[in-house]
Amino acid sequence: MLTAPNKNNRPLFAAKDIKPFYLEHSSRIFPQKNGLLGLVEKLLKSIVGPKYDGEYLHKVIREKLGKTRLDETLTNVVIPTFNIENLQPIVFSTYQAMRTPSLDARLSDICIGTSAAPTYLPAYYFKNQIRQGYVREFNLVDGGVAANNPRASSSVQIQPPTYGNLITILSIDGGGIRGIIPATILEYLESQLQVLDGEDARLADYFDVIAGTSTGGLVTAIGLLGLAGKLLKSIIGPMYDGEYLHKVIREKLGKTRLDETLTNVVIPTFNIENLQPIVFSTYQAMMTPSLDAQLSDICIGTSAAPTYLPAYYFKNQIRQGYVREFNLVDGGVAANNPALVAINQITKQILDGNPDFFPIKPMDYGRFLVISVGTGSSKAQQKYSAQKAAKWGDLGW
């Protein structure tokens, strides 16, 4: 609403209008029934279907936004959504709409889709007709499923680039047991570097920043010790209780702490105690001692994928009498694209005028050399439709 144009081609809403809008409509978007019967009805409704039908919300959004399309916004916007048909994120942006006409949907449809929080509001299905005879279908839920914190860990700082000419980044995606894929690729990459520069060459010698999520975070830390391929191959066995994985990680990493890594690392985790991301980085550990934890604890935390491995609790004693507690799960919950996290942190440092990055400019992405190693592509098969998911409650989701 801040970027949709009104009749005078000015923003439909000012920032100060947002709060009154919520206050005016929230009671009808999320109607509440008092008393025991109301509580029981709400509980039963949440089990068999969404708590709210979303009809009033849809009506208000359509009234406010009308038929305005994405390419008509007054400035570029980025709105994440999640497509439950193929379990893939779809990010709508003004610029992308100009390049990909099928994404130039009505703002009302995009907003209804990105606000369809599972268990609260029904999944949203719509068609976008691009030209005569060609229609693209969308089955959307809350964009937070795919990107719930676009600026996760904005305070993390990155060490200056090694050579000043290029900023080199290695990003390693998570993927459970499929982490064996990037481990194998990195093992090969390091072997080829050793052919060129000798047997002592290590990946840590070539990258200013190494970022990883989930098993990618595990590889990030282990890779700095030259053990990536062997370790991940050794944990293919039973891991669901996490005991064997924890044992192997502790054996390999010992008591090594974050500030002892051979290059700067960025490892996202997610703290379920306050539902906030915590990003561990080497440089941040030097500035914030409470984050200078043992690598083994960080790796166990970032690899604790919900439903696969148990959440991980540990204490980090910083000094006599002061202990910080962590309750961590898979970093992919907060940042499933570690390359984006790393680039975000570097860009922020440049924008903040950090002299270590001179003369690289914020938009000088030609000076960023990024190697992003994934865990394979997902199967291109249809999973769910919005019509089906719209009836789900807690059990369905």
Image: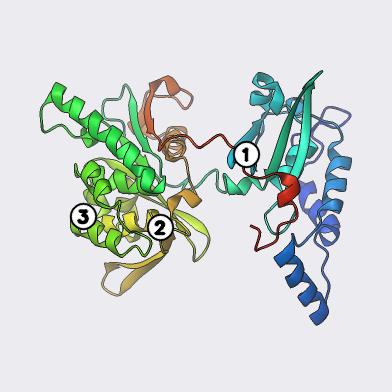
Quadrant including the N terminus: top right
Disc 3, SS? helix
Few, some or many C-alpha atoms within 10 Å of disc 1 (few <14, some 14-19, many ≥20)?
Answer: few
**What's the CA distance linking mark 3 and mark 1?**
41 Å
Q: Which residue is mark 1?
A: 382
Q: Nearer the viewer, mark 1 or mark 2?
A: 1
Quadrant including the C terminus: bottom right
In-front residue for pair 376/264: 376
Disc 1, SS? loop
Which residue is rendered at x = 58% and y = 37% of the image? 381
89, above or below 55, in the image:
above
Nearer-N-terminus badge (1/2): 2
**Which residue type does callout 1 highlight?**
Gln
**What's the CA distance linking mark 1 and mark 2?**
27 Å
- Asked if marks 1 and 2 touch (Cβ < 8 Å), the reply is no
Nearer-N-terminus badge (3/2): 3
**What's the CA distance linking mark 3 and mark 2?**
17 Å
207, above or below 22, in the image:
above
Residue 252 picture location, percent across and down: 19, 54
57, above or below 93, in the image:
below
Residue 153 picture location, percent across and down: 46, 48
Q: Which residue is mark 2?
A: 304
